[in-house]
Amino acid sequence: MSGDVPVTIPRVPAREAAEDELSKAVYHQNDPSLLQRALEWLWRKFADLMDSASGAAPGGTVGLVTVIVLVIVLVVLLRLRLGKLRSQPAPGDGLFAEGPRTAAEHRAAAEEHARNSAWTEAVQERMRAIVRSLEERAVIDPRPGRTADEAVADAGRHLPAHAAALRDAARTFDDVTYGNRQGSPETYTALRDLDIEVGRTKPDFAATPARASGGARP
């Protein structure tokens, strides 16, 4: 009888029909989202990487984790010890960016900051007082836009006994101004004492370019 004859469908149409059926949304309601699939793929890659690294590291996974923790601790300790990376002064950011003032005015401002325990500002003003005093005494020529490092390099040639201390003072100024360091009573006292000592020292102009070339100092 015709009802006993099996119905046969060619292979290709049967496959296409199955694919069409399975592509219906009802079969994919519980599928993970694209984001979930991407995260799972990344996690698998990370796990593979960790497995490979742990196989190469002494102690396996425990040894790898220990190394990572030690590196993190080292970075934190270096950050605490060194502070932020010291930035370079921008062009035009000279020592006296706020405008011309006398050495006495800078000293008065430094002492006022010190009385208020504003040590960073006190250090900055005391360094400005030192350099301005050197300019007022004609130890160095006034130069707009000059940095603390440039000023002490010029002054050190005429004040050799204080050259190293002046370099240290300029480094302290740079640290608190550009390196996010904080001033302290000790650093301020050191700069104040240096200011007094430099003011008492007679500069030596014997090594100036004019003398070295045979010229006479007026």
Image: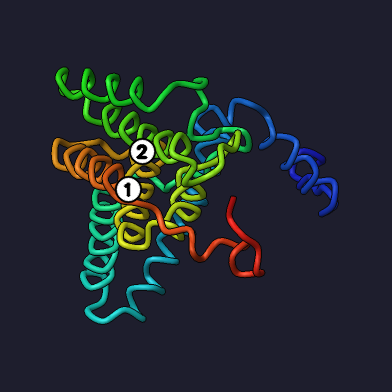
Three-letter amino acid code at disc 2? Ile
Above or below residue 67? Residue 141 is: above
Looking at the picture, how far across and down is residue 97, in whole percent?
52, 26
Most foreground residue, 99 or 161: 161
- The image quadrant that residue 27 belongs to is top right
Q: Is residue 173 left or right of residue 155?
A: left
What residue is disc 2 on?
Answer: 130
Q: Which quadrant holds the N terminus?
A: top right
On the image, the x and y values in percent for residue 203 come to 39, 53
Q: Which label belongs to residue 169?
A: 1
Q: Residues within 10 Å of mark 1 (few under 14, many from 20)?
A: many
Above or below: residue 86 compared with residue 28? below
* Mark 2 vs mark 1: in front: 2
Pointer 2 with pointer 1, Cβ within 8 A: yes
Q: Earlier in the sequence, mark 2 or mark 1?
A: 2
Separation of disc 2 and disc 1 at Cα?
A: 10 Å
Task: Give the residue at x 38% y 73%.
Answer: 53
Q: Nearer the viewer, residue 26 or 184?
A: 184
Q: Report the amino acid beneath label 1.
A: Ala
Q: Residue 156 falls in which quadrant of the image?
A: bottom left
Residue at the spot x=28%, y=70% of the render?
A: 64
The structure residue drawn at horizontal position 23% and vertical position 41%, both measured from the top left corner, is 196
What is the secondary structure assignment of the residue under circle 2? helix
Q: At x 67% / y 29%, what residue is drawn?
A: 24
Q: Is residue 89 left or right of residue 182?
A: right
User: Where does the image place residue 59, in percent across and percent down from the top left?
Assistant: 22, 79
Q: Position of residue 118 (x, y in %)?
A: 22, 23
Q: Residues within 10 Å of mark 2 (few under 14, many from 20)?
A: many
106 or 46, nearer to the observer:
106
